Image: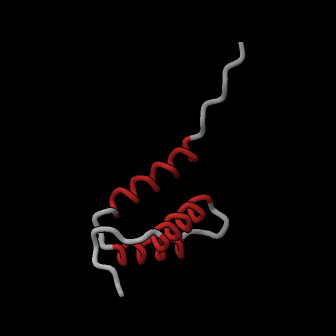
């Protein structure tokens, strides 16, 4: 019988680490979350999966309307 290959931990670790980061950043004010995401994007190498995920999170954070917070304007 052939065994199925084990799933790689690298892909699971990236998704888990991004999910944990989002959970930890949730209590921060919106402008701080945006600043942290920009800093993390600047530290990650071009073309990495994590960078793509962080850019998507930043895009979501900047395009979604703010809720239960004071909005500028």
Q: Residue at x 40, y 59 (%)?
A: 22
Left or right of 40, for residue 2? right
Q: Residue at x 65, y 70 (%)?
A: 46
Residue sitting farthest toward the right: 2
State how the image is colored. secondary structure
Q: Nearer the viewer, residue 30 or 37?
A: 30
Q: Quadrant of residue 5?
A: top right
Q: Residue at x 67, y 20 (%)?
A: 3
Left or right of 58, for residue 2? right
Q: Nearer the viewer, residue 66 or 43?
A: 66
Looking at the picture, how far across and down is residue 13, in whole percent? Answer: 50, 48
The quarter in which the C terminus is drawn is bottom left
Q: Residue at x 28, y 68 (%)?
A: 68
Looking at the picture, how far across and down is residue 7, in whole percent? Answer: 60, 35
Looking at the picture, how far across and down is residue 14, in whole percent? Answer: 52, 52
Look at the picture and state if 64 lies above or below 31: above
Look at the picture and state if 73 lies above or below 16: below
The image shows a total of numbered marks equal to 0
Look at the picture and state if 14 lies above or below 59: above
Look at the picture and state if 6 lies above or below 31: above
Residue sitting farthest toward the top: 1
Left or right of 50, for residue 5? right
Looking at the picture, how far across and down is residue 21, in whole percent? Answer: 40, 59
Q: Nearer the viewer, residue 42 or 58?
A: 58
């Amino acid at each position: 019988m052939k065994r199925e290959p084990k799933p790689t931990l690298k892909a699971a670790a990236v998704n888990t680490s991004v999910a944990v980061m989002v959970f930890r950043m949730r209590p921060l004010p919106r402008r701080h979350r945006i600043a942290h995401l920009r800093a993390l994007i600047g530290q990650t190498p071009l073309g990495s999966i994590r960078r793509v995920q962080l850019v998507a999170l930043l895009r979501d954070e900047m395009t979604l309307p703010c809720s239960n917070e004071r909005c500028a304007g």
